[in-house]
Image: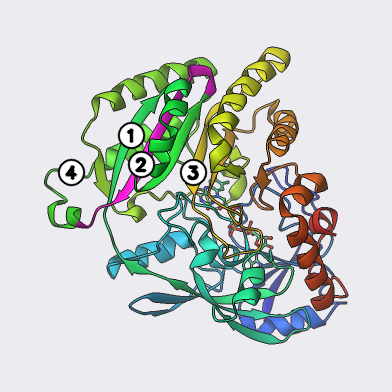
Amino acid sequence: MVTRVTRTSSADSSGIYRRPRLILKLKRFEDLPTVLSKTKSYPTPIRMVGADYSQTRCVGGDGGTTVDTAALDKIIEFGENFVRAQAGVRVGTLVHALAERGLELPLTPEMGLISLGALAVTTLPQASHAAGTAQLSSLVTELKLITPQGKQMIVTERERDLMRVLRSSYGLLGVVHEVVLRVRPLTPVKIDYQVLSLREFVGRFSSIVNAPGAVRLHISPFNDRITVERRTLDESASLSRSGIWQIRKSVMRNVLPAFGSTVGSVLAAPGLRAAMLSGMQRALRGSTRGVVMYAHEWMRDLPLEAWKARHTYSLWAFPQADYPKVLSQYFSFCKSYYKQHRYRCNVVSGASRLHQDKGSLFSVSYSGPMFTLEPSSTGDTGWDDFLIDFNDFASSLNGTPTFNQTRALQPEHVARPFGERVKLFRALRQRTDPLNRLRNSYFAYLLG
Ligand SMILES: Cc1cc2nc3c(=O)[nH]c(=O)nc-3n(C[C@H](O)[C@H](O)[C@H](O)COP(=O)(O)OP(=O)(O)OC[C@H]3O[C@@H](n4cnc5c(N)ncnc54)[C@H](O)[C@@H]3O)c2cc1C
């Protein structure tokens, strides 16, 4: 029924500690109830793994059973405004299949190696266009899962509260094997860039947030540069894709990597990085026309083995109203950290504007509009220590973290922003999984 593989190593090459006793390559979801009920054959905790690209120990094997969903890879049904697929399908595969049918997800991430199971139950904020949908899990309208007791459950968005909790459940309330996602007709996106100094950014902040479109930032504290990337849905461009707005894939392929925004792109030496950045920024300054493309065209795939990506980052979100202050303090923090420790991030920091989204319990924009801040690196020496101090910095500025993309988290970083939501989740988890069949030490530490 399943392929069983034993493993002895205590950490993978990325340094993320996992140590499952068993890794099961699940072939059929029908086998899940047996896996969940046979505690001797399949040791606790049972943890699902999708693409294995999280930045934290949220998969965390802990001497238990890690269940690999990669073989659940069927796209089951394409509708006019929905798609039904199994949990192991990768977002990149799905998005390309949708594009062939003239459809797309209302939010498209920049990298394709995300499993639909993880998309449904983790926090994946994206530069958003409108209130209500800023995390990928908010696209989920139906979930099929197996509970810790081995029962099949089907939940639709009509059960709002339950769906809200499941969309933030990280495999702690059940194992997802099938999802339905909202889709819409493929819509061209016009992309414009503006390169600003911190002072200019702060001065123009209200016009930046009030103009239509999704906003992504590329932040370079040591060069005093913030590149504002605006993505505007442009229905009319579909008629004139070869006309006024030329599709210039080369911008995505060649320019964005220099900002560190396209995953897998790294710039090793700070000196080289600074030189390339200023060159690219000069080039972009001269570019007044922008580009038009479909969202799936900017998506990148990473190596199948997560540790080969050589790109790591951490993510916090801050209230939109505070963001100019946060960014000013981030510039100062980076400079004084460098002075003291001679370390600075060797990839440009990213950021996304997030509209309010109450679709999931641990949504980082649950309480209102936010901006993320994502220091990025190749994982060079000094990065792990930097993140410890950065976490305290972010927490002291009312930052909200995620459980899958914020590294080196401590319980106090979680308790302050999530407060009552953590208590609610803990109570639910204890009721639905009293034997802790699905819980690993990472979540025990952070959520109890
Ligand atoms: C270089 C890089 C670039 C990235 N770029 C982006 C980006 O542009 N946009 C973006 O949104 N994210 C991005 N990410 C984040 C990353 O994709 C996610 O944090 C993560 O990869 C989620 O997908 P996964 O399949 O790898 O999840 P995994 O790491 O395999 O799992 C994540 C969590 O979900 C649980 N889980 C997985 N499958 C199931 C299931 N079937 N049922 C129940 N629980 C399950 C796991 O147990 C775990 O707790 C990037 C990451 C990297 C390293």
User: Where is residue 413 shown, x and y percent of the image?
Assistant: 76, 44
Residue at 56% in and 63% down? 119
Taking the image in four quarters, ligand 1 sits in the one at bottom right
- Left/right placement of residue 157 relative to residue 121 reads left
Would you name the residue on which mark 4 appears? 245
Residue at 44% in and 41% down? 216
Q: Residues within 10 Å of mark 2 (few under 14, many from 20)?
A: many
User: Where is residue 200 shown, x and y percent of the image?
Assistant: 42, 23
Please state the extent of the stretch shown in magenta in the rendering: 221-235
> Mark 2 or 1 closer to N-term?
1
- Indicate whether residue 227 is drawn in magenta: yes
Q: Secondary structure at mark 1?
A: strand
Q: Secondary structure at mark 3?
A: strand
Would you name the residue on which mark 3 appears? 352
- Which dot marks residue 193? 1
Q: Residues within 10 Å of mark 3 (few under 14, many from 20)?
A: many
The N terminus - image quarter? bottom right
Circles 3, 4 touching at the beta carbon (< 8 Å): no
Q: Secondary structure at mark 4?
A: loop
Q: Secondary structure at mark 2?
A: strand
Q: Is residue 17 visible?
A: no
The amino acid beneath tag 3 is Ser
Q: CA distance from mark 3 to mark 4?
A: 24 Å
- Indicate whether residue 13 is drawn in magenta: no
Would you name the residue on which mark 2 appears? 230
The amino acid beneath tag 2 is Arg
Specify the quadrant of the image occupied by residue 430. bottom right
> Mark 2 or 4 closer to N-term?
2
Circles 2, 1 touching at the beta carbon (< 8 Å): yes
